[in-house]
Image (cartoon, rainbow, N blue to C red):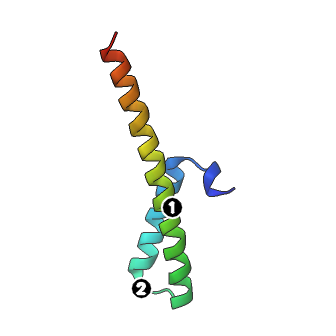
Amino acid sequence: MSDNKKTFEENLKRLEEIVRALESSDSELDKSLALFEEGTALVRLCTKELDEAETKISVLTKEHSNE
């Protein structure tokens, strides 16, 4: 399953796993770089989803206040 098909919560959980793995410092350099690259992609994806949700909330709140 690609990251685009996973839920926000699944992506966030994977990001947390990556952070723990990087913090453990048991990984080899190549593996750490691959994890970092995956993590940065997940951060971008999660940020995009949060921005979209914030936009929807703003629109809905604005529409509700105009009624």
x 36%, y 31%: residue: 58
Residues at marks 1 and 2, CA–CA distance in whole angstroms? 20 Å
Could you classify mark 2 by the number of other residues whose Cα lies within 10 Å: few (under 14), some (14-19), or many (20 or more)?
A: few
Q: Could you say where residue 53 lies in the image, as x and y percent from the top left?
A: 44, 38
x 41%, y 36%: residue: 55
Q: Could you say where residue 46 lies in the image, as x and y percent from the top left?
A: 47, 53
User: Label 1 belongs to which residue?
Assistant: 42
Q: Along the horizontal axis of the image, is 3 left or right of 61? A: right
* Res. 28 in view: no
User: Label 2 belongs to which residue?
Assistant: 25
**What's the amino acid at mark 2?**
Ser
Labels 1 & 2 near each other (Cβ < 8 A):
no
Q: Along the horizontal axis of the image, is 24 left or right of 35? A: left
Residue at the right extreme of this rendering = 1
Above-or-below relation of 3 to 51: below
Above-or-below relation of 48 to 43: above
**Image quadrant in which you'd find residue 64:** top left
Whichever of labels 1 and 2 marks the residue nearer the N terminus, that label is: 2
Disc assigned to residue 59 = none
Q: Which of 43/15 is in front?
A: 43
* Res. 23 in view: yes
Q: Nearer the viewer, mark 1 or mark 2?
A: 1
x 47%, y 50%: residue: 48
